[in-house]
Image (tube, rainbow, N blue to C red):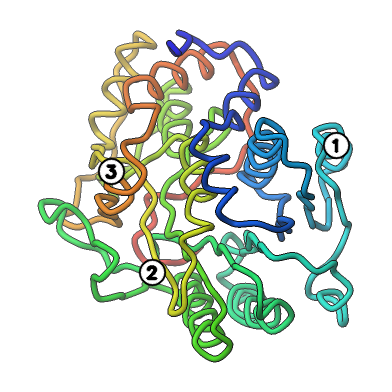
Amino acid sequence: MKEPERIEDVETLEEMLSRPARVVGDALARAPGDILILGVGGKMGPTLARMARRALDAAGDRRRVIAVSRFSRGDLRPRLDSWGIETIECDLMARGAIEDLPDALNIVYMVGRKFGSTGDEPTTWATNAFLPGAVAQRFPRARILAFSTGNVYPLTRVDSGGPREDHALGPIGEYAESCLGRERVLEFFSRENATPVAIVRLNYAIDLRYGILADVAGKVFRREAVDLAMGFVNVIWQGDANAQALRSLPLAASPPFVINVTGPEIVSIRDLARRFGERFGVEPILRGEEAETALLSDASCARSIFGPPRIGLETMIAWVADWVARGGESYGKPTHFEVRDGKF
């Protein structure tokens, strides 16, 4: 199917982000049982849940997809309900909350805390490292698909191509350290209880309403300076990230299966700013110089298993530029990709 030149509105965007290829349904068929998604209220959760539901529906599979969140966004719960996704309002940190959740054979763990970590480190550690252990104890016989981050890697030389999954870990700052804590706690319970676990190290997912491309495009469009401190990044279309994550579910293992999920290119922030400037007819304002190192990931393993992402960088740039120029909806939540000291 040929991709459109532009994405007209949020409804079309969310349909595209949640559109499952047949291979997603094939993967879910190898992971029988209901799917319980914890922390669905984040930026990726709704479209991932919808993709799972759509993939099962296409296969005539009526098992449950259950979405759990505090639902602080008032419009989210009715939208999920309208998509055929069951919803449970729950603060997972509340005493006894996890025990009250329904049993399920597949757990998608999307709970995480990043921004606001500096100054409130205890909450970040409790959310990112304590809570996963409580979930693993509650569901020892389930498959657990857990979202992690490329922040568990150290900054590496740009000419290295980025770390693969077996690279020595070296998180910078307490947010990243707590994410490694999440992985280690899940690894402990995976080994202790033979719980199959898949850990997806993601960076960075691209929607039109947020993400590194939206950050850079917005700054160029508004004639604001683009910081080059973190001069190079990896990006992947959120729909492709959703699909690769769901396809990782049947690959869960003990000890955990770990995979980097991102795009194949190492993308230059300077080049992105220049290209957005050309589309907007302005000269981008650049600040600073690129360092020799950056937060990167090598996703060659994912490409060998899943193939290349469906949406390429050129298409993402065109869609984001058009969206920003038209004043499309924004979450107003910068990624802070330029941060090099791990303080978020």
Q: Residue furthest bottom?
A: 192
Which residue is denoted by mark 2 in the rendering? 152
> In front here: 211 or 180?
180
Which residue is denoted by mark 3 in the rendering? 228
> In front here: 334 or 37?
37
Structural distance between the alpha carbons of marks 3 and 2: 22 Å
Name above or below for residue 339 compared with residue 119. above
Point out the tag, 3 or 1, that comes first from the N-terminus. Answer: 1
252 on left or right of 104 = left
Structural distance between the alpha carbons of marks 1 and 2: 33 Å
> In front here: 7 or 212?
7
Residue shown at 26%/41% (left/top)? 264
Q: Which quadrant: the N terminus?
A: top left
Q: Amino acid at mark 2?
A: Val
Looking at the rendered structure, the secondary structure element under dot 2 is helix
Which residue is denoted by mark 1 in the rendering? 75
> In front here: 148 or 119?
148
Viewer-nearest of labels 3 and 2? Answer: 2
